[in-house]
Image (cartoon, rainbow, N blue to C red):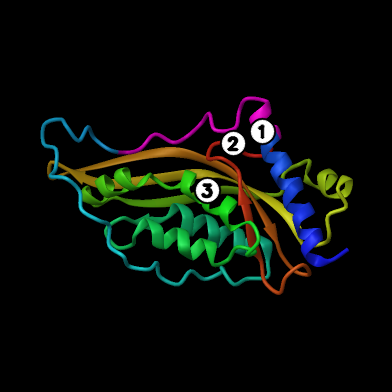
Amino acid sequence: MSPTRRLKIILGVIAGILAILIGVGIYGLSRPAPFVPDPTGPGASSPPGDSPDVPPAETPGLDSADATEFATATAALLYSWDTTATGRQQLIDKLLSVGDGTELNGLASDLDRHLPQPPIWDQLADLGTVQELTIDDLSEPAGWADVADDNDLPAGYTALTVTGTRHRTGTWLDEPVESTHLVSFTMFLACPPAYDSCRLLRLSEPGVALP
């Protein structure tokens, strides 16, 4: 079997897992609420401008061959950002650069769900919002080994579930404001020996993770 054919089969397995989550009615039901005051209420800011097109700083670990180190760096880039210093699309582009190159449309859609939508991002930038992620646990889902065995996945293909808390801080009417929200999701990776360094394949919906 050619490597391309095998990769398509693997991605099909992952897509099937995501479809199962949809089928049992939990996929997409726990999307984080945005930290944004009512833009039409008292003290609302003027219409937001574009976020700065500044690429994110280099993130140690994104070129790692270790699944845990790579997943930690990926989660940090996805959930720790400063809206006044980095553009939303730049974060997406950076994460797509560590994709496998085959399922980038699906990965781009996944990333889009995890980040505030562009109008919300611009409003967050008006508030000077900074978000940080605290990871409480990063581990392989309990049933992943059986999934890998049942589908004869090659060595290096794995899944890791992230659970933690995202913290947002900003300024509203010259007063500091903050919010916290639980974070959980599963990332699907391809690491050595499948690739020289880890690659990001897909992400589950925010708030929905393989246990």
- Relative vertical location of residue 13 with respect to residue 156 in this rendering, above or below: above
Give whichever of discs 1 and 3 has the lower sequence position: 1
Q: Is the residue under label 1 in contact with that under label 2 (CB below 8 Å)?
A: yes
Q: Count neighbours of disc 2 (C-alpha within 10 A) and say few if under 14, some if 14 to 19, many if 20 or more.
A: many
Q: Amino acid at mark 2?
A: Val
Question: Can you identify the residue that label 2 sits on?
Answer: 208
The image's mark for residue 68 is none
- Relative vertical location of residue 57 with respect to residue 46 in this rendering, above or below: below
Element carrying mark 3: helix
50 left or right, relative to 115 = left
Question: Along the line of sight, which residue is nearer the eye, 85 or 87?
Answer: 87
Question: Can you identify the residue that label 1 sits on?
Answer: 21
User: What separation in Å lies between label 1 and label 3 (alpha carbons)?
Assistant: 16 Å
Of the 4 image quadrants, the one containing the C terminus is top right
Residue at the image position 14 percent from the left and 43 percent from the top:
45
Residue at the image position 82 percent from the left and 61 percent from the top:
155
Element carrying mark 2: loop
Residue at the image position 30 percent from the left and 44 percent from the top:
119
Instruction: Please provide percent x and percent y for residue 190.
Output: 71, 61
Q: Amino acid at mark 1?
A: Leu
Q: Amino acid at mark 3?
A: Ser
The image's mark for residue 109 is 3
